[in-house]
Amino acid sequence: MAKSGSADNSAKETAAPAITFEQAMETLETIVAKLESGDVPLETAIELFQEGMSLSKLCGQKLEQVERRIEMLVEGDAGLQRKPFAASKEEA
Amino acid sequence: MEPARALSIRDVNRLIKMKLEGDSGLQDIWLRGEISNFTFHSSGHMYFTLKDEGSRLKCIMFASYNQRLPFAPKDGMKVLARGGISVYERDGQYQFYATAMQPDGIGSLYLAFEQLKKKLELEGLFLDSAKRELPRYPRTVGVITSPTGAAVRDILITIERRNPGVDVLLYPVSVQGTGAAPSIVKAIRAMNELAEADVLIVGRGGGSLEELWAFNEEAVARAIRASAIPVISAVGHETDFTISDFAADLRAATPTAAAELAVRHSGEVRQGLVHLEQRMAKSLSGLLGKARERWQNAARSPYFTQPRRSLLVQAERLDRLRDRLRHRVQAEHAKAKERLSRLNGRLSAVNPNQQAAFARKRISSAKRGLELAMNGIIRQRQSQFGSLVRHLDALSPLKVMARGYSLVYDEREKSLIRTINEVQPGDLIHVRLADGKLDCQVWGIEGEEQANG
């Protein structure tokens, strides 16, 4: 599915599924609401529960990914370029 | 010489006051001057003098007005004051009653700010309906500010503290001076073209109104509103709003606050996940419980647990129905029987046998009566007849003839001859006697005297 585009310019999420944290959270919340409505057949409820638990796990994993990038955009001859940024310690 | 009329001092002062207050050139005016003799009275009112090179004017600013002052006035400060001239009657002193005041020098900026704010407001740039919702879990936060200020450091530290997994993309801009506004506008556009950041923080640390001015520029406000990425404004000034603040999707009082608004604390998010899991588990166990209950209810049904009992129930019902049927039949039978006997009674009451017997009785008794009566009559008639026979016998002509009388008949023996006139001499006659008859011929007729008869 994610063979073009995002996979290339996002070096960090090479093998990760193409679902964002936000999407996962939204799906999870929808599942919770559906379960709480009580208006689902038992088999569906169990499936939903399993899906919700794996989504929650996925979200938890995503939260653990702490390799943060802090980059500064710099205008160069070839347009915008990125370079790592570290805030200066001095008071402004 | 006595004047015709002398005014009181009070009247004069009042008159002057009315004159001054009625003069539109002295009401709702702006004054520029330097503050001196400033007193902030415990009543909350401010008393001071405004002066310039050649003149001074006593001023008062009541508590109700000075509460909203965006700065603290002090001696030597150049200000622009708005208000009107009036008279303090008691002292006969005219003074300036200030209703608004601002530091001078930025006065023109201030007016420009108000005008621009009004204009953009009318355009609908600040409408709540135009505000975009912030992403709840941004992966990348775009920061547009000075790369050297405290603002960028505060933002980075705050994001690091709340969620170390969130990327930051910094677009360095100058945040004050003439080039500030164009560079901010350019940065916002570039961020949108890049489309990598989920939310933008645009701002700077605190400063004077002049220093913050770039964020009051129309171009910046429009760029913020035109951004497809939601924008949090973070101009470090707690009390005053900039035009950017109004145009942004969310206004943060400081860069730190902006970072807090942009990024949720990962601990909270984790807690939220735990909470969601708990809610799912609770819902599922509730559903399972409900299903189990339904199953148990079904399994507990007497049809499954005591199948014979359901048959017994039917058997009992059958017995009852049978009883009822029997009772009903018996009752019907008894009723019919009773009806029959009642009819029999009525029928026997009208039985013709009895009537016949009765009639027979009547016939025989009538017969007996009839016979009795008949016999009576016969006997009576017989005795009557006997007496009549005796009577008749007594009257019989034979008896008379036996005493010597005879009967004379004509020749043909058909009629009795009672008188001599009925016969002629020579006629044959027959004479009956008691013991026989004589055939005779009349040979004379002799009449008899009537008199001796």
Image (tube, coloured by chain):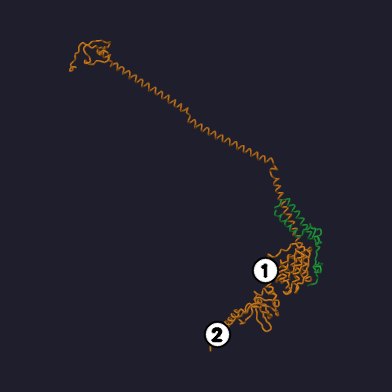
Residue B95 visible in image: yes
Tell me the subunit letter for badge 2.
Answer: B
Image coordinates for residue B65, horizontal then vertical, percent: 65, 74
Q: Residue at x 62, y 81 (%)?
A: B94
- Helix, strand or loop at disc 2? loop
Return the residue nearer the eye: B313 or A51.
A51
What residue is pinned by disc 2? B6
Check the rendered structure and report the hue given to chain B. orange
- Helix, strand or loop at disc 1? helix
Residue A72 visible in image: no
Image coordinates for residue B394, horizontal then vertical, percent: 28, 16
Tell me the subunit letter for badge 1.
Answer: B
Q: Which mark is residue B244?
A: none
What residue is pinned by disc 1? B123
What is the C-alpha distance between the residues marked 1 and 2?
A: 61 Å
Image coordinates for residue B276, horizontal then vertical, percent: 74, 57
In the picture, the quarter occupied by the C terminus of chain B is top left
Q: Which chain is green?
A: A
Which comes sooner in the sequence, label 1 or label 2?
2
The single residue placed furthest to the front in the displayed view is A78
Return the residue nearer the eye: B145 or B338.
B145
